[in-house]
Amino acid sequence: MINAVNLSGRENLINANEKKATKQENTVETTAQQEACVVEIGRVPEKKATYDNPKVLKPDVQKIEQLKKEAEDALSPLRQMVFREQDRSRLLYNIFLHQTGLQTA
């Protein structure tokens, strides 16, 4: 035989699940409140990241000239080496043209 369906039993099961869900929501809220309290206790005041009175510096012409001279002195040997290699390359190219009988345009 088939057992009869108990309608009142279904309603109780649905209500039981809703009550459990409510308890879980309360637990989560309590946890969030506890975490918020911990954060508030250990909170450090924020510091400002900008200046109140920034100074506008005028360019130091003397310092700029000094740095420019130092850079020129440091690059001088490299510049001389490049000029020597260009002269050597030009000379070898002219020798090659002369030996092969080709002429420059």
Image (cartoon, rainbow, N blue to C red):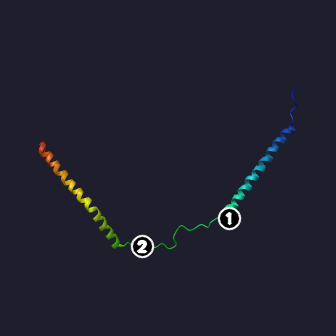
Q: Please state if 45 lies on the left or on the right of 50 as rendered.
A: right
Quick one: SS at disc 2? loop
Q: Please state if 39 lies on the left or on the right of 88 as rendered.
A: right
Q: Which one is earlier in the sequence, the residue at label 1 or at label 2? A: 1
- Between 71 and 55, the residue placed more toward the observer is 71
Picture quadrant of residue 47: bottom right
- Between 27 and 81, the residue placed more toward the observer is 81
Quick one: SS at disc 1? helix
Q: Which residue is mark 1?
A: 41
On the image, the x and y values in percent for residue 48 come to 56, 68
Above or below, 29 relative to 45: above
Q: Which mark is residue 57?
A: 2
Q: How many marks?
A: 2
Q: Residue sitting at 69 percent across and 61 percent down?
A: 38
Above or below, 4 relative to 12: above
Q: Residue sitting at 12 percent across and 44 percent down?
A: 99
Above or below, 33 relative to 56: above
Instruction: Name the quadrant of the N terminus.
Output: top right
Label 1 to label 2: alpha-carbon separation: 43 Å
Q: Residue sitting at 75 percent across and 51 percent down?
A: 25
On the image, the x and y values in percent for residue 39 come to 67, 61
On the image, the x and y values in percent for residue 3 come to 87, 30
Q: Hey, what amino acid is under mark 1?
A: Ile
Q: Please state if 24 lies on the left or on the right of 73 as rendered.
A: right
On the image, the x and y values in percent for residue 77 come to 25, 61
- Between 87 and 48, the residue placed more toward the observer is 87
Q: Hey, what amino acid is under mark 2?
A: Leu
Q: Residue sitting at 75 percent across and 52 percent down?
A: 27
Instruction: Mark 2: give few (<14), some (14-19) or many (20+) Cα within 10 Å.
Output: few
Toward the top, the furthest residue is 1
Instruction: Mark 1: give few (<14), some (14-19) or many (20+) Cα within 10 Å.
Output: few
